[in-house]
Amino acid sequence: MAAAFDDIIPSFLRASGLVADPAAARLTPLTGGVASDIWKVEADGRVFAVKKALPQLRVAQTWLAPVSRNASEVEWLREAGRIVPGVVPEILASDAEAGVFAMSYLDPADHPVWKQELRAGRADAAFAAKLGRTIAAIHAGTAGSPEIARRFDNEETFHSIRLEPYLEATARVHADLSGPLLALAHDTLCAKLTLVHGDVSPKNILVGPDGPVILDAECAWYGDPAFDLAFCLNHLLLKCLWTPAARAEFLACFDALAQAYLAGVNWEAPAAVEERIARLLPALFLARVDGKSPAEYVTAEADKERIRRIARPLVAWPPRRLSEIRAAWAEEVSA
């Protein structure tokens, strides 16, 4: 649950002109995030959401991140909305210094969270394909832009929120794989190609009436677009353990997402970005059991061992195609 409504928020609401009297506003904490406090605000006949970044993320291990990421999130949302209208909530106001912003509130009744849809076994390959096309469009619309690269020069934040807790932390657990994992972290940080969301996870995607709506761009960074695809595809593999009855549908979503995305790649050879996705994916797969942010629904040691059994050799000897990873995991979960 979000923290108490601190003094920064009333000041922000008043200064932004969103609420005439913050003391009279109805504030409801929203759950689901580890990196920010989020509230639903009802006041003066309107409803919207307010988000404030946390310096210490809510995980078992120490995980610090600069609150300046809040301003980058706002900028990512604006850029994505410019490229693909309707794909993000509307930004209503922001305060970069305070690390807080307000955005439109999308009712779960008609914008359910994709993670919950997948949990229920409702895995729509057509939706996954539309998500793939959307991500590709955002990458294509920002590729090779010196101005976007300058505005999203967020190496420190991306390292602290993504590479250190996922790849580097996993390297400390699997010392025999530290070489390829640390090299992967280095190579990923050095790639400067497109604007990257950094957390394309089902928990950050709403199933809107017209297609996906993407939230939570706190990891926004100008870097390697392969990370976005690897991060999302990883979740579709993991869901096979969460809702086994929908395993075939999850794998169909994996295929649809990957194929639709690669069809939209025009800033480099699709095979080149696929090879980087295929290198990242097994490492992120392993990180969800042995990194700083383990998947909360993978709790059985037998399931953790299944992930390690598939991921470890693929980290050591990365494949060039996603189909190899998909086939290995499909065989494992079918056994």
Image (cartoon, rainbow, N blue to C red):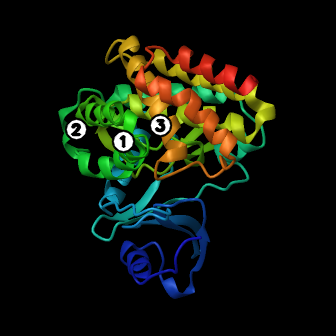
Measuring from the top left, give residue 79's x and y in whole percent.
36, 41
| Disc on the earlier residue, 2 or 1 | 1
Please rate how many residues cluster around mark 3, counting C-alpha atoms within 10 Å: few if below 14, some from 14 to 19, many from 20.
Answer: many
Measuring from the top left, give residue 221's x and y in whole percent.
31, 43
Pointer 1: what residue? 79
The answer for how far apart the CA atoms under marks 2 and 1 are is 12 Å
Please rate how many residues cluster around mark 1, counting C-alpha atoms within 10 Å: few if below 14, some from 14 to 19, many from 20.
Answer: some
For the N terminus, the quadrant is bottom right
The answer for how far apart the CA atoms under marks 1 and 3 are is 26 Å
Instruction: Indicate whether 45 appears above or below 33.
Output: below
Instruction: Indicate whether 315 appears above or below 299.
Output: above
Regarding mark 1 in the picture, which secondary structure is present there?
A: helix
| Identity, as a three-letter code, of the amino acid under mark 2 | Ala
- Residue at 27% in and 37% down: 189
Q: Does residue 30 appear to the left or right of 11 in the view shown?
A: right
Question: Which one is nearer the viewer's eye here, 100 or 235?
Answer: 235
| Identity, as a three-letter code, of the amino acid under mark 1 | Glu
| Disc on the earlier residue, 1 or 3 | 1
User: Which-is-in-front pick, marks 1 and 3?
Assistant: 3
Regarding mark 3 in the picture, which secondary structure is present there?
A: helix
CB within 8 Å, label 1 to label 3: no
Pointer 3: what residue? 284
Pointer 2: what residue? 149
| Identity, as a three-letter code, of the amino acid under mark 3 | Leu
The answer for how far apart the CA atoms under marks 3 and 2 are is 25 Å
Please rate how many residues cluster around mark 2, counting C-alpha atoms within 10 Å: few if below 14, some from 14 to 19, many from 20.
Answer: some
Residue 206 seen by the camera: yes
Residue 214 seen by the camera: no
